[in-house]
Amino acid sequence: MSKMAKDILKMDLYGLLGIDITATPKEIKKAYRQKALTCHPDKNPDNPKAVELFHQLSQALEVLTDAPAKAAYDKICAAKKQAEERHRKLDDKRKKIKLDLESREQQAEAQTQDEAFNTRTLEEEIARLREEGSRQLEEEQRLIREQIQRERETQQTGSYTISGVVKCSKTNVTPKLKLKWKCKKDDQTNGGYSQDILFRLLQKYGDVSNVIVSSKKKGSAVVEFATVRAAELAAKNESGLSENPLKISWLEGQPEVIAPASQPGLFMSSQFICFGVGEALALHLPEAPFRPLINTPNLGDPRNAESHGDPREAE
């Protein structure tokens, strides 16, 4: 491309003449004359740029009044505009991507700050709990220890009272509870329960002798307690993990109700009498024949008529 062509392409010929791209040759010439008269070097001797501007007007007139040259110029200008439009759209797209990226970075930063704040808050609460202690937990554990102590004391008689109900158990039977929970066959965590976890959950009720987690049947275990009272407390109060609760049932050694302590005169068909150290015997007493408490003679018997008299004679 020649230097002249490069110079022409750098200029906006239509803008230089102040006309539109649809202007006719006659309109182009008229616009040239008007511009040339105002910027002719003879009229502007003190303006050093007048000569250059007049030369540019002449080039615009030559190109735009020649049909082939004008068509080539218009084609190149149209291509340049299309390229500029593509660049503009690409810039808008890049700008949008940049804005989206900045927005995501801001959201991620805000989320990180929220997580850091929540973490700090949790750590502060944990520290506060450690400093103050869990009073509620300590109170519950104290009550459980007191109940266990009372149970150990009442083991000397083999019976104990709960809410006015006397209960009796046999000491030759180890109290055992059967535990069940939900667990899938391929669950490696066994539903969140292990021997150590079960031991920690149940030992607060009393001495745990043994915890046997079934290796064949998922989600089941057997627990042996040292005392019936500890087993009963565990069966009544323990629920296990909140996300996978336990189902607890008696396997052996469940205590039996004798009678309400507030009704000492109440008798049952099977009466339980407790002997020795924690031993209870169930005595099934046979029904004795009825005998009157006072020997009342049969007044209708003739053999008793002499000694007691005949009531018909008294009449």
Image (cartoon, rainbow, N blue to C red):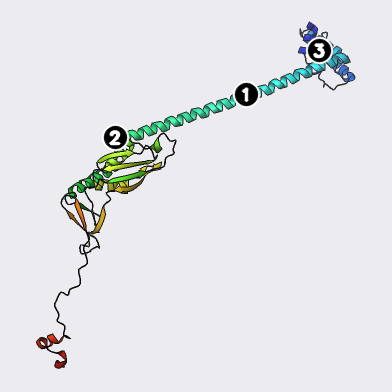
Q: At 61% across and 25% down in the image, what residue appears?
A: 97
Placement of the C terminus among the 4 image quadrants: bottom left
Q: At 47% across and 29% down in the image, what residue appears?
A: 112
Which x, y percent locates residue 59?
83, 11
Which x, y percent locates residue 169?
23, 51
Residue to which mark 3 is pinned: 39
Q: Quadrant of residue 3?
A: top right
Q: SS of the residue at dot 3?
A: helix
Which x, y percent locates residue 72?
83, 15
Judge from the rendering whether residue 194 lies leftward or rightward of residue 112; answer left or right.
left
Residue to which mark 2 is pinned: 131
Q: Is residue 135 visible?
A: no
Residue to which mark 1 is pinned: 95
Label 1 – label 3 distance at C-alpha: 43 Å
The answer to whether 191 is drawn above or below residue 284 in the figure is: above
Placement of the N terminus among the 4 image quadrants: top right
Q: SS of the residue at dot 2?
A: helix
> Between 315 and 305, which is closer to the camera in this rendering?
305
Q: At 72% across and 22% down in the image, what residue appears?
A: 85
Q: At 44% across and 31% down in the image, what residue appears?
A: 115
Q: Amino acid at mark 3?
A: Cys
Q: SS of the residue at dot 1?
A: helix
Judge from the rendering whether residue 242 lies leftward or rightward of residue 137; answer left or right.
right
